[in-house]
Image (spheres, rainbow, N blue to C red):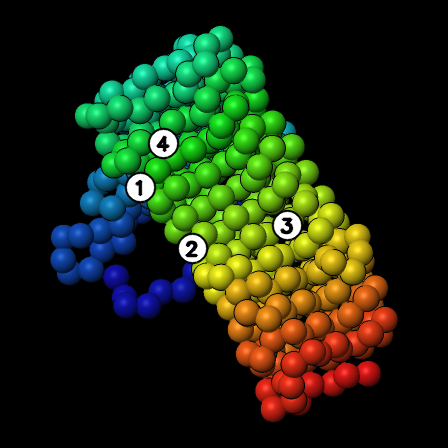
């Protein structure tokens, strides 16, 4: 055969450019791609009605195979199979459903179907069927119904020799009934991941872990909703109506979370809050040595953000409509702190307040339309650069000589 061939033909649905036809009634039509080596890609098909692939899973299949090993197949009904392991459905799901493995009893065919989170997808692991529930083995644990505790103890209790525990609340609730202690008990040396459910009515913490991750959890009516004592992450969670703090983290990241109607929305000991919302708390964010980035603090009754002695940082955040009078602020810098590239506006007290013992760095902020003072300095350690302070009742108030530390600000 020549190196280069052309086929020219006025094709139609009944007269194609190229026809490969298998004369055996139920065998593959094969097209191979191969160089001088023995490796090859094969493009095979069984267009006969009722025919199946070699594993008897895909009907009327067309298949890509590498060295006779099936990599991708699609059936005449639209069903798709990948690597001879995962079979995808040929129907669309409904709003809110996700694709999940629904049957792993056959290790040669992980069936994947549309399920509602917390619904028909059967989790794997050990069932938590009552509270309190003690865990002594590392592994995966899950709920299949709401559980309520009847005694004044912790709800889910990991103990040695367990070292690593995953808890899938599976869309259900662990309820402390206002007598239980912690929804999950934190234990030093045990990593715990908790996800997909609710925790409420615990006298201490709704979800408390020493280290690990908490994801897609709602925690209400506890002392603290969710806390990571040592190191970990909290993501896509909500905390409301707790008596102390919505969410608290030692080291790690709180991301894409909302905290409402708590005395403290978020407490960042040495952690990071990113893209979080604190609304209608007493104090929105309480920052020690932490960092808050791209966050929102609004409608908190005293201060949107408080930066204390540790030296926290607030960057690229919006702080508005916080406080109820001159003693309150959008951002209250009590200790060493940095406020950079933020919008601080329409607060019912001051925009930014820097106290006498603080060492405040205010850089490139837009401070406007606050009801009392835009930026209030009572510190000799303040440094402010390239801020825009405008349309506040009083734009700037200073009780200390800080002119030497003011560079390129616009006060109008």
Which residue shows up at 48% across the image and 65% down it?
311
**Tag in front: 3 or 1:** 3
Question: Label 3: few (<14), some or many (≥20) within 10 Å?
Answer: many
**Tag in front: 2 or 1:** 2
Asked if labels 1 and 4 touch by Cβ distance under 8 angstroms, the answer is no
The residue at which mark 4 appears reads as 186
Q: Nearer the viewer, residue 252 or 327?
A: 327
State whether residue 44 appears in this view: no
User: Mark 3 or mark 4: which comes first in sequence?
Assistant: 4
User: What's the CA distance linking mark 2 and mark 4?
Assistant: 18 Å
Q: Which mark is residue 270?
A: 2
User: What's the CA distance linking mark 2 and mark 3?
Assistant: 16 Å
Q: Is residue 318 left or right of residue 125?
A: right
Q: Nearer the viewer, residue 337 or 65?
A: 337
Q: Nearer the viewer, residue 398 or 389?
A: 398
Residue 314 in percent (x, y) is at 56, 64
The residue at which mark 1 appears reads as 71
Asked if labels 1 and 2 touch by Cβ distance under 8 angstroms, the answer is no
User: Mark 3 or mark 1: which comes first in sequence?
Assistant: 1
Which residue shows up at 38% across the image and 35% down it?
209
């Amino acid at each position: 055969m020549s190196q280069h061939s052309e086929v020219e033909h006025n094709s139609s649905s009944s007269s194609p450019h190229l026809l490969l036809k298998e004369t055996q009634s139920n065998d593959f039509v094969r097209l191979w791609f191969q160089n001088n080596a023995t490796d090859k890609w094969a493009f095979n098909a069984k267009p006969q009605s009722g025919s199946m692939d070699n594993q008897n899973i895909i009907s009327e299949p067309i298949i890509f195979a590498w060295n006779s090993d099936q990599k991708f197949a699609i059936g005449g009904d639209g069903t798709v199979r990948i690597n001879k392991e995962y079979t995808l459905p040929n129907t669309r799901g409904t709003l809110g459903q996700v694709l999940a493995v629904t049957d792993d009893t056959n290790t040669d065919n992980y069936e994947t179907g549309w399920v509602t989170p917390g619904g028909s997808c059967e989790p794997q692991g050990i069932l938590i069927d009552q509270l309190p529930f003690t865990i002594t083995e590392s592994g995966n644990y899950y709920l299949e119904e709401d559980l309520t505790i009847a005694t004044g103890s912790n709800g889910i209790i990991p103990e040695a020799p367990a070292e690593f525990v995953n808890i899938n609340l599976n869309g259900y609730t662990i309820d402390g009934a206002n007598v239980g202690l912690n929804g999950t008990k934190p234990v030093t040396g045990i990593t715990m991941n908790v996800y997909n459910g609710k925790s409420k009515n615990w006298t201490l913490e709704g979800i408390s872990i020493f280290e690990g991750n908490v994801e897609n959890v709602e925690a209400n009516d506890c002392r603290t909703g969710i806390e990571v004592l040592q190191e970990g992450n909290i993501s896509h969670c909500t905390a409301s109506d707790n008596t102390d703090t919505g969410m608290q983290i030692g080291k790690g990241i709180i991301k894409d979370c909302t905290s409402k109607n708590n005395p403290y929305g978020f407490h960042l000991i040495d952690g990071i809050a990113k893209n979080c919302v604190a609304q209608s708390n007493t104090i929105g964010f309480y920052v020690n040595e932490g960092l808050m980035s791209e966050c929102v603090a609004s409608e908190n009754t005293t201060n949107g953000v408080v930066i204390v002695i540790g030296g926290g940082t607030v960057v690229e955040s919006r702080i508005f409509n916080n406080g109820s009078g001159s003693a309150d602020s959008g951002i209250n810098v009590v200790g060493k702190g940095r406020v950079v590239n933020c919008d601080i506006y329409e607060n019912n007290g001051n925009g930014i307040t820097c106290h006498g013992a603080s060492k405040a760095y205010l850089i490139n902020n837009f401070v406007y339309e606050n009801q009392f003072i835009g930026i209030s300095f009572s510190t000799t350690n303040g440094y402010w650069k390239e801020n825009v302070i405008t349309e506040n009742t009083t734009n700037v108030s200073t009780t200390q000589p800080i002119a030497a530390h003011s560079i390129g600000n616009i006060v109008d």
